[in-house]
């Protein structure tokens, strides 16, 4: 089965002279095609005073271009039964689309229009601004969102890009002008280090020729190199409990700074976390906190690392009376994780689980495209999926222990509780 996974021999990869990286994988047994990728223009570049500008820009890309107004753009997609959307993050502007394979040229033309020639119509931008402010007002009552914001602000200092939500705030969104958005697009959007993945019932040579037709002449001499992330100082213990009127439960997050995807112990940390709060009934903390003690409606853990160091966090939904007990139980499990190796059975079970589900993640064109984008984006190499089982299986209990010890101090956590 592993021989059927996308790899160097089956993925066509080409870098255009303008720096655009194109990766194509043929799935002739399907009738559709998926495009997925990213542009190096995330909110990493924006100032805190303009927080949310890049997110607003990304949401504006599909609201009108030089060739298509809003209605023409979306009617064209609807007539094909296709979709095309944009997303934003700290490091990248992402895009994703799907159509019948025969409509790939039209889908790529619309992507080119949206990325290269958006018009940012005033009426659409103001409508988007109103929608964003409404959404942000609603989020002030969202306990999970409030807890996550507190964790982010506790882990990362004020001037770090990860300190801020890229969706902006009620204070910053009104200050963002259309000229701000247009200027940012003009200076930050370009093909250098853009990634475009195409997966579906296509001919690689023809698909690559179509990409060149719409993107080969896209050069932006102003496109900046992404700045380095600021160095992180040692975190300090922090506890934030927020009362939210009208709530009957509380959202709890306990976090510490974890690895980035580039860290050599990232995959060992993933294994340790799988035992802590993922495998089976959400690992050890699920067994202890939810099943044995009945302290939480849900509880799990995850490692959020991406292009920079993310949070290693435990997330739980609890009755307000159970908050302190849940925190104590989770601390005890974190202490166990950093003081003794996981058992041979736990290690083997999670390794089998995480490698066994890999083919399931690749059953669709979307899953394949996302995986190829990850491999390219993080520089893993196109044989990453082929080598994944071996890479996970060689991780030892001692490797997992060292990874946990490198990032977790049970007495030095950022904790946020929002709710009743």
Image (cartoon, grey):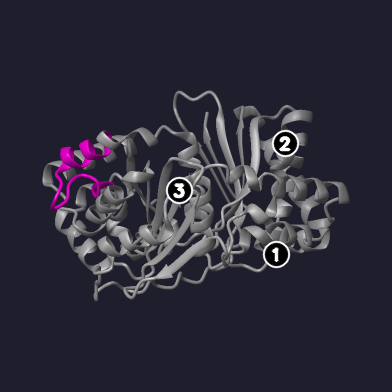
Q: Which residue is mark 2?
A: 286
Q: Residue at x 65, y 36 (%)?
A: 299
Q: Residue at x 53, y 42 (%)?
A: 364
Residue range highlighted in magenta: 59-78
Question: Nearer the N terminus, badge 1 or badge 2?
Answer: 2
Seen from the viewer's position, the closer of residues 169 and 287 is: 287
Q: How much space separates mark 1 and mark 2, taking CA atoms? A: 23 Å
Residue 207 seen: yes
Q: Residue at x 72, y 56 (%)?
A: 389
Q: How much space separates mark 2 and mark 3, taking CA atoms? A: 39 Å
> Relative to 155, does residue 131 appear above or below in the rendering?
above
Image-based side of 397 in relation to 208, left or right: right
Residue 183, position in %: x, y? 18, 63
Residue 350, position in %: x, y? 76, 47
Image-based side of 198 in relation to 53, left or right: right
Q: Which residue is mark 1?
A: 406
Magenta-span inclusion, residue 42:
no
């Amino acid at each position: 089965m592993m021989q059927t996974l996308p790899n160097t021999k089956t993925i066509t990869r080409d870098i255009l002279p303008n720096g655009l990286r194109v990766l194509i994988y043929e799935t002739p047994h399907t009738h559709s095609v998926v495009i997925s990728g990213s542009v190096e223009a995330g909110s990493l570049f924006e100032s805190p005073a303009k927080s949310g500008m890049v997110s607003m820009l990304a949401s504006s890309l599909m609201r009108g271009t030089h060739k298509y107004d809003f209605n023409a753009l979306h009617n064209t997609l609807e007539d094909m039964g296709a979709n095309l959307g944009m997303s934003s993050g700290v490091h990248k502007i992402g895009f994703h689309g799907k159509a019948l394979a025969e409509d790939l040229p039209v889908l790529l033309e619309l992507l080119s229009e949206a990325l290269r020639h958006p018009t940012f119509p005033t009426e659409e931008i103001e409508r988007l601004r109103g929608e964003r402010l409404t959404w942000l007002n609603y989020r002030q009552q969202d306990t999970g969102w409030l807890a996550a914001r507190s964790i982010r602000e506790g882990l990362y200092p004020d001037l770090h890009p990860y300190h801020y939500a890229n969706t902006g705030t009620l204070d910053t969104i009104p200050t963002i002008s259309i000229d701000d958005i247009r200027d940012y697009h003009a200076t930050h959007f370009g093909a250098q280090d853009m990634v475009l993945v195409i997966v579906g019932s296509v001919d690689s040579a023809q698909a690559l020729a179509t990409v060149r037709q719409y993107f080969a002449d896209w050069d932006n001499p102003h496109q900046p190199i992404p700045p380095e992330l600021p160095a992180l100082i040692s975190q300090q213990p922090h506890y934030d409990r927020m009362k939210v009127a009208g709530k009957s439960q509380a959202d709890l997050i306990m976090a510490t700074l974890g690895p980035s995807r580039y860290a050599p112990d990232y995959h060992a940390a993933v294994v340790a976390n799988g035992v802590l709060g993922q495998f089976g009934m959400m690992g050890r903390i699920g067994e202890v906190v939810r099943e044995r003690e009945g302290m939480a409606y849900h509880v799990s853990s995850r490692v959020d690392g991406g292009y920079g160091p993310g949070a290693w966090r435990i997330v739980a939904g609890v009755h307000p009376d159970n908050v302190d007990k849940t925190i104590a139980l989770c601390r005890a499990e974190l202490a166990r994780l950093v003081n003794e190796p996981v058992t041979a059975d736990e290690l083997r079970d999670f390794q089998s689980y995480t490698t066994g589900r890999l083919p399931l993640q690749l059953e669709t064109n979307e899953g394949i495209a996302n995986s190829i984008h990850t491999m390219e984006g993080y520089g893993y190499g196109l044989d990453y999926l082929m080598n994944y089982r071996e890479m996970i299986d060689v991780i030892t209990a001692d490797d997992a222990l060292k990874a946990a010890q490198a990032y977790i101090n049970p007495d030095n956590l950022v904790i946020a509780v929002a709710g009743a």
